[in-house]
Image (cartoon, helix red, strand yellow):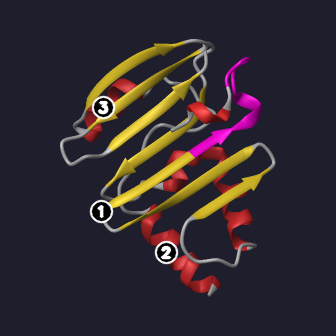
Amino acid sequence: MKSIAAIFLIAVSSTVPAWAVLGQSQESVQSDAKTLKGTLTTTEMSGYSVQQINRDDGMVLKEFVSPEGKVFGISWKGPTMPNLSQLLGLYFAAFQDANRSTHRRGPLSIHTGPLVVETGGHLRAFHVRAYVTVLLPSGVTEAVVQ
């Protein structure tokens, strides 16, 4: 069972690249939109901004950015899974360690330290939601990461 989960993670982590990196600066968003061949929109919210890239195939990548310019949350919806190692950046190792200790099939929900990663979906309809609790701006809750 663990080997099936590991194979699944390796397979979905290598399908489509994602460039927004959790916990890092938002500066790469313009190049992300060009690389993904998507349309970039920015929405200013109270206490944070959402930078969203939409692609014609239905992929939507959202970066949730603090006023300091740090990515505190990411969501992905699309026909393929993103590259989780790129998406989670320095948090990927903690995600892998926590995933090794789970014994379930289906949607994955990892809560380890300040990192929360939730994945799910099925062929052509995948979704990922990830955020770091200690990076949430003051007055902003994890519920905004959708």
What residue sits 62% from the left and 52% below the top?
117
Disc 2, SS: helix
Residue 125 in picture, x, y percent from top left: 34, 59
Q: Residues within 10 Å of mark 3 (few under 14, many from 20)?
A: some
Q: Which one is in front, 76 or 146?
A: 146
Compute the Cα span from label 2 to label 1: 15 Å
The magenta region covers 130-140
Judged from this view, the residue extending furthest toward the left is 56
What residue sits 55% from the left and 84% below the top?
4
Disc 1, SS: loop
Above or below, comparing residue 67 to residue 84 in the picture = above
Q: Residues within 10 Å of mark 2 (few under 14, many from 20)?
A: few
Query: In terms of sequence position, does the residue under pointer 2 or pointer 3 come before the other?
Result: 2
Q: How many marks?
A: 3
Amino acid at dot 1: Arg
Residue 118 in picture, x, y percent from top left: 59, 54
Compute the Cα span from label 3 to label 1: 21 Å
Amino acid at dot 3: Ala
Label at residue 8: 2
What residue sits 58% from the left and 35% below the top?
73
Examine the rendering and report whether any part of residue 21 can be seen.
yes
Compute the Cα span from label 2 to label 3: 27 Å
Residue for badge 3? 33
Marks 3/1 in contact by CB < 8 Å: the verdict is no
Label at residue 124: 1
Above or below, comparing residue 91 to residue 120 in the picture = above
